[in-house]
Amino acid sequence: MSEKKHISKKELRRRKRKRMLMIKTGILCVLLAILGIGIWALAGGTEKIQQKAQEKEDQKTAEVDGSVSSDSTGGSTDAPATKAQIMAEADALAQTYDYDGAIEKLQSVEGAATDADIITKVAEYTSTRDACVRVNINEVTHIFYHSLVVDPQKAFYQDNAQTAGFCQWMTTVDEFKAITQQMYDRGYVMVSINDLVKKTVDDDGTVHYTEGDIYLPEGKKAFVLSLDDLSYYHSYDGRGIASKMVVGDDGKPTCEYIQDDGTVVTGAYDCIPLMDQFIEEHPDAVYHNARGTVALTGYDGILGYRTDGDYKTREDLTDDQTAWLDAHPDFDWDKECEEAKKVADAIKADGWTFASHTWGHIRVGDKPLETIQADTEKWLTYVAPLIGGSDIIIFAHGQDLSDWHDYTMDNEKFAYLKSQGFNIYCNVDSTQYFVQVRDNYLRMGRRNLDGYRLYQNLYGGGEDRTSDLFDSSQVIDPQRPTDPSLYDLG
């Protein structure tokens, strides 16, 4: 007989209550466990959940910006630009009158042919482009500056023989800003000197030029800009002018300036960074994001760096060069050249071009061929390698190789410079336009926007030669001296 038959009904009821209690206890434990997880989530777990959510949001933002995209491993890879990003890039091109580039950019969007936004924008750019007018290359004016004066008191009011030169040749920062703004307001648009011509090269290296095709909206006027003597000569020391060009934290070219207490500060103290700032604020101030041309001598180095060979050999030094070397006993010529090249590379990457201004700032019209040859060899040896060479020569002192008649190969100076790779030649000419596009060269006259010109415009008693560009009375710096003897007015 089995044991079960001997268990009373009372015992069975007791055991049943015990099992029910165990079940309830188990359920309670499960509930407590669940509650514990919830409490954990509200405490430390909440922070992790929020972190995960933020990471997901950051990922989405990065993908919209076109900077990264998720891959299968959860890392990030370069992602193609978004439609919005491409449209913004196209608009930036269109602002500089590069409508073809803007249209090409838009057409790179996937599905562009059926995208309503893209179709509308392409039609807009096409219409604007087709309404543009071809620039008459023979009516493009060319302006130029020297290094700018930051402190007029230092530049213009020292009692020495150099003061008249600074008054005549230099423009102040405020004058430069006012001229730039007025020219922009009048519809002037900067073009590169290389935009003026279309260049072809034969198999033997022979260069041919024809007039370039520049199209601007009606009412806009093209101009070319160049800068002379961006070498920061020793004679500039203490005259309230920047001391050198450097590369800024953003990789862009900028300047160093030495304050009265000897502190060196970095900023927009000369034409290059000031023009870059203006273009950033007014992208339609330039054609196809053009920049100007920087003309360099070599005898005191370039861009504020003492790169000429005389600093290395310590031979044939001027008193200024000797004093500078004595003040810099740790000078390393190779390192100096390396730093100058870095700055030159940054200037070129920014869109600027370089030119020869002759090595010794010589008068090519007055000097014999032998002197020009020796000078050119020095420029090609000590300057050209640092800037990557150039086929542009901007003559010092405003001189030229001949009168206004065309250059020919019978002109031995022209024939020599052509043989050394120079194809673009610039003098100084106070007329509004002087442009010669010939098969084997481009020649252009330049207009000096300096203290001499401003003072002559206002007080010289003759023609205002820059009234087409700006109002001199609204430009001239009130800190500029008024002594006519300082401006060649007697």
Image: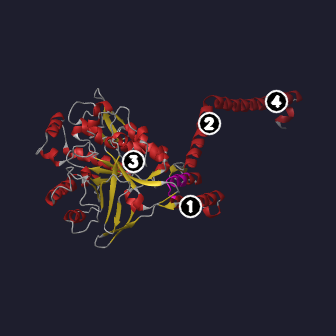
Tell me the SS state at disc 1.
Answer: loop
Label of residue 49 in the image: 2
Cα separation, mark 4 vs mark 2, equals 47 Å
Cα separation, mark 3 vs mark 4, equals 114 Å
Q: Pick whichever, 333 or 327, lies toward us.
A: 327
**Considering only order in the chain, which callout, 2 or 1, is on the residue closer to the N terminus?**
2
Would you name the residue on which mark 3 appears?
466
**Considering only order in the chain, which callout, 2 or 4, is on the residue closer to the N terminus?**
4
Residue plotted at (41% across, 57% down): 140
Task: Please state the extent of the stretch shown in magenta in the rendering.
Answer: 88-98
Check disc 2 and give the amino acid type.
Answer: Ile
Tell me the SS state at disc 4.
Answer: helix
| Quarter of the rendering containing residue 420 | bottom left
Q: Is residue 291 in the magenta section?
A: no
Residue plotted at (33% across, 58% down): 444
Between circles 3 and 1, the one closer to the viewer is 3
Check disc 3 and give the amino acid type.
Answer: Thr
Residue 198 as seen in the image, left or right of residue 20:
left
Tell me the SS state at disc 3.
Answer: loop
Image location (x, y in percent) of residue 371: 15, 56
Residue 405 as seen in the image, left or right of residue 433:
left
**Considering only order in the chain, which callout, 4 or 3, is on the residue closer to the N terminus?**
4
Would you name the residue on which mark 4 appears?
15
Cα separation, mark 1 vs mark 2, equals 57 Å
Label of residue 131 in the image: 1
Image location (x, y in percent) of residue 470: 43, 45
Dominant SS of magenta comes to helix
